[in-house]
Amino acid sequence: MTRVPGYLYKVAAHLLHATFHASLRRPLKWLRVQGLREKVTLNAVPDGVLRIVCVHDLSERKKFEESLRYQATHDELTGLPNRWLFHLHLSQALVRARRTGLRVAVLFLDLDYFRSVNDSFGHTTGDALLVQVGTRIRSTLRENDTLARLGGDEFAILLADMKNVDEAVRVASKLLLSLQASYRLQDQDVYSGGSLGLAFYPDDAQDSDTLLRYADMAMYQAKQAGRGGYACYSQEMDLRGHENMRLHTRLKEAMAQGILQLHYQPQVDVESGAIVGAEALLRWHDPELGHVSPARFIPVAEATGLILPLSDWVLETACQQIAAWTQAGTPLRVAVNVSAQQFRQRNLPEQVRAALARTGAQAQWLDIEITESVAMTQPAQAREQLDALVGLGCRIALDDFGTGYSSLAYLKALPVSKLKIDKSFMDGIPQDANDVAISRAIIALAKSLGLTLVAEGVETDAQLAFLRQYGCEVYQGWLFAKAMTVQELTSRLHGVQVP
Ligand SMILES: Nc1nc2c(ncn2[C@@H]2O[C@H](COP(=O)(O)O[C@H]3[C@@H](O)[C@H](n4cnc5c(=O)[nH]c(N)nc54)O[C@@H]3COP(=O)(O)O)[C@@H](O)[C@H]2O)c(=O)[nH]1
């Protein structure tokens, strides 16, 4: 008899004294004793010479097996089902849906700006955020919906037995709304919304792998459309998804090979025609893909996290150039575009300070361009970041002014010293009465707030005449020049007096 707790001896004794009923000649597999499942083996020999009873206490083993099963099917951090279990539930839901004729929806969620949270607050806080996100999503779902963590900041949701697509879309909207509220981490309010992709059985795909892949693609589309929203899978996305993947791979290689370039588009004084600054703009001529517009690859870089190393390179290169022009006796103000992700990293001012120190560039020649939407998504954090950048000696320019929130309150609240009127308004000058009215209003506003104004996308003499008439100080556009190489701009600087 092996390792038997006291109460089991009684069972064993009872079995030993049992006469040799035919049923006992076979091993008894399981007995339930005081709530425990024990394996009992009784070998009874008919002549009565030998009787052996083995009683094994398997409760520890059972516990161990159960914990192994749990570990294999659940995410360690959040305790949610993992990818394997999600696929199992999805396959079961698909079998049921084939019988009932109802729909199955797969939702793929990726947190927005999670990497920034990790970078700014550390991985422990990042983990705490993931746990809170899991709890929050779970509380918005029904009990029989499956929520799984697939890894990193990716979650998947299975909504079975859906009568129509709208039902799933309603859940998606509710879920995204719940993610918009802040999380309390390390005594601070942290924001991290999410982007969602949806794919449906039987509309989009028949099997679990493809449904999840399509939902992932749709999520990517939602990210590219500006984050915080959802997108439903469509066939065109499949094509776009492949293109984006290729672009992402080539962009990574281009960065590693150092074939990206920064070009500079002059900013020109409306009255004197002198170059008073330049906007640094990325240019990528790829040996395989040819010229790729930043309007095409920046969103891919944003969606895949490549934007952070890319932005670091832009900042460093622009600062090197500022230092070079200053040393050459032709100092020039350079504006650098700061992406949403870069701005959300809490250490942006430190990165700028370090880049200035490394390159020997003076902060007074560096303009940081942010868009209205970047400034407005997290106003409190924006204020802190911008104050720190201004503290270093940089100037802040608000890009695409007039196209976003255009809240006058934040113009007062944020330390902005420059407004850029968006090209879309210039396009309508002088023929479109609305564009004329809006541009005049922005010029008047900038003047009364003491802000420098730059008009973007100026292509015609008529537009320039309009700017001159209403007192806009600086313009930028193809009328004067497209973005050009350092060498081209340097020779122009030598020909034109810099104020
Ligand atoms: N985060 C970063 N974003 C960047 C960086 N480099 C570029 N970008 C962003 O990509 C978008 C497209 O940029 P690009 O194709 O370079 O277009 C810029 C100008 O070339 C264009 N422009 C300027 N003048 C004219 C004109 O007269 N006509 C005309 N059709 N286009 C013109 O406008 C773009 C400048 O846009 P903006 O930044 O809003 O001032 C664009 O959103 C870039 O911001 C980068 O390094 N980082």
Image (cartoon, helix red, strand yellow):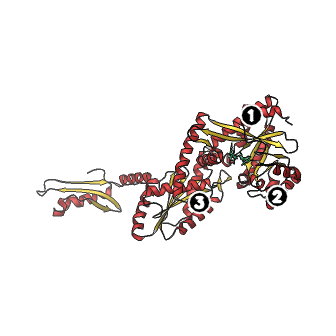
SS class, disc 2:
helix
| Disc 3 residue: CB within 8 Å of ligand 1 | no
Q: Residue at x 53, y 51 (%)?
A: 241
Left or right: residue 25 compared with residue 210: left
Amino acid residing under circle 3: Tyr
Camera-nearest label, 3 or 1: 1
Q: Which residue is mark 3?
A: 230
- The answer to whether residue 138 is above or below residue 387 is below
Camera-nearest label, 2 or 3: 2
Left or right: residue 103 compared with residue 388: left
Please say whether residue 319 is visible from this viewpoint: yes
N-terminal of the pair, mark 2 or mark 3, is 3
N-terminal of the pair, mark 1 or mark 2, is 2
Q: Which residue is mark 1?
A: 488
SS class, disc 1:
helix
Amino acid residing under circle 2: Val
Q: CA distance from mark 1 to mark 2?
A: 34 Å
Q: Position of residue 370 (x, y in %)?
A: 73, 48
Amino acid residing under circle 1: Glu
Label 1 Cα crowd, 10 Å radius (few <14 / some 14-19 / many 20+):
few
- Dots 2, 3 in contact, CB < 8 A: no
Q: CA distance from mark 2 to mark 3?
A: 36 Å
Q: Which residue is mark 2?
A: 436
Q: Quadrant of the C terminus?
A: top right
N-terminal of the pair, mark 3 or mark 1, is 3
Q: CA distance from mark 3 to mark 1?
A: 44 Å
Q: Position of residue 193 (x, y in %)?
A: 62, 56
